[in-house]
Amino acid sequence: MRLRRAMLETKATGQVEIYGLMAEFDTPESLLAAAERARQAGYREMDAYTPLPIEGLAEAIGFRRTLIEKIVFTAGLLGATGGFMLCWWMTVVAYPHIVAGRPLNSWPAYIPITFESMVLVSCIVAVIGMLMLNGLPQPYHPVFNVKEFERASRDRFFLCIEARDPRFHTEATREFLESLKPLEVMEVES
Amino acid sequence: MADERDDSALMDTAVDPGPDKVIGSGFDMGSATDKIAGVVYRPLLKTPKQMFIGFAVAFALVNLFLVAVTFLFYKGVGVWGIVIPIAWGFAIVNFVWWIGIGHAGTLISAILLLLKQDWRTSINRFSEAMTLFAVACAGMFPILHLGRPWLAYWLLPYPNQMWLWPQPRSPLIWDVFAVSTYATVSFIFWFTGLIPDFATMRDKRPNTLAGRIYGMLAMGWRGSARHWARYQKTYLLLAGLSTPLVVSVHSVVSFDFSVAILPGWHTTIFPPYFVAGAIYSGFAMVLSLAIPVRRWYHLEDLITMRHIEAMSKVMLGTGLIVAYGYAMEAFMAWYSVGTYERYAFYNRIFPQPGTYWWTYWLLILSNILIPQLLWSKRVRLNVLAVFAISIVVNIGMWLERFVIVVTSLTRDFVPSSWGMYYPTFWDWATYFGTIGVFLSLMFLFIRGIPAISIFETREVLHHEVAPSHVGD
């Protein structure tokens, strides 16, 4: 959708719509410092791209907390309840069957299945939840339009200030990014 | 394209930095990425020739497996040596052996992650794959052993017109849940770890078929800081969930035995001793695979003596727990004053014609005596010695399961129901066949997927440069 709209607008105005401006750094430390500076300068709509997780970087770009723990906790609770209720229902309701004089609801014997269901459901939900919160799978993203970006999965570190930020201004933001002493500043086509 | 130069110079040399370093000197993030990705992106004909030979042997065994299974399906389980009372035979011995081998993978990737062990990186991906393939081999045996394997789905609780449900008080049904959960979670853990590396593979060769396939698997991963934050939290949660899972799976497997009243099975030491044994055999298998592969691909600077020594120590430690388990079995046989329990134990250890006593002593030799050599640092630093010991332990752990399953079943309470078990050609063919399946999958994995976690190697390098990050 976005791509088509961008193409139409390009046709109409002869100009390329900008997703944002991207600065390339060669160390994690310089990227971290740059992200903090950008936040102090009032930019909010930005993201940093790195080939490895960097401690403190998410906080520096203003990302506070993830929902994932809560989602996984809920999933675990549901999985455990479901596993236990499955055993209980099979042995008490659906197919009551007295074995060695034990009560129908012989709950200690249900614990292994309860535990395994808890782990199974929470692990599946953890990964699917993480991918969904991250918006993956995502076949197209503008940052990949930048040629240099293929080193974001190798040994380079990128900061992208997005055009939707209210303080974004092509010239002023470019100047700001240049002042952070990156290797290069690039335009990201939408 | 990030690199069009030939990586072969980088590929053909490697210096082991010794037992103190987890990574060789002279690596930066770029060159480490190139080296690990280069193992996969090598031209097919430049694959080390040992890989071709190894794969040929393994693939021949796969074919043997297919023949054995076809014959089994055609004739029924009678082609195996199983008789009453030894109805379990090789199928269950192999099941327990394989699932035990799988345990090292999750231990390395989950428990060592939580314990912040730096030597976990560079072997975790590899051993997770090993887990996955070992569990696949393990899972086949109970199904092949069913007699009517096409009815395997009856083990699962699902609404059916007979309104019959599985019995959730039985350890055999716990096993269905434990093993299938374990297989699924191992796959999820492995795949999640691979996502950033698939992105690396995609970016190294854009616009090629391989690059596109990796691109689809990477699902558009772009290394955003927000994504990493959620990713790391998820990875930690998966590790936290997998840690009790590893312990539970082999405990449940041990319940298959210990919940029964058969002398030699009905023992409370089984769960911890099975878990320790599983980790023991799993580390042995990681060493048996990692030592040749690191040599063939010249990865001595990524899988260093530090890794090999640390794994040897884990092997030694878990081996001692296993030894304690054997000692406790002997002690309880004496202390319980149970006639049947004592007899089962005597039958295991005292030489009598027509019994399996020698398997017990072979097992003591290979699981307890020989691995004690690992107390010596000189042995731990000798790659060939460690490799030999790891093979011995693999055999020993198989013998342990043989002793537990077969020896106990041959002599139960009433002498009129005693019997002997002799494996047939088809027993061996199925067993070696699964080894072939396992090795073939490992060879294909090493060729097609980065066998060492690239982004975690970058983290190791980052922490080496900035040591202040370590431990926070």
Image: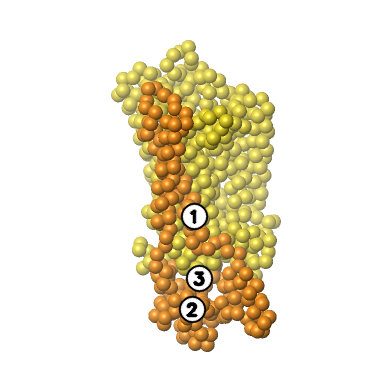
Chain colours: A orange, B yellow
* B122 or B240, nearer to the observer: B240
Label 2 sits on residue: A165
> Type of residue at label 1?
Val
- Other residues around mark 3 within 10 Å, as few (<14) / some (14–19) / many (≥20): many
Q: Which residue is mark 1?
A: A127
On screen, B189 above or below B230? above
User: From this viewpoint, is residue A148 visible?
Assistant: yes
Q: What residue sits 56% from the left and 28% below the top?
A: B162
Q: Amino acid at mark 3?
A: Tyr
Q: Residues within 10 Å of mark 1 (few under 14, many from 20)?
A: many
* Chain on which label 1 sits: A
Which label number is shown at residue A49?
3
In this rendering, position of residue B4 left or right of residue A39: right
User: Residue B139: percent from the left, percent from the top?
Assistant: 55, 38
- Please name the amino acid that badge 2 sits on: Asp
Decide if residue A59 is on the left or right side of residue B287: left
Residue toward you, B292 or B177: B177
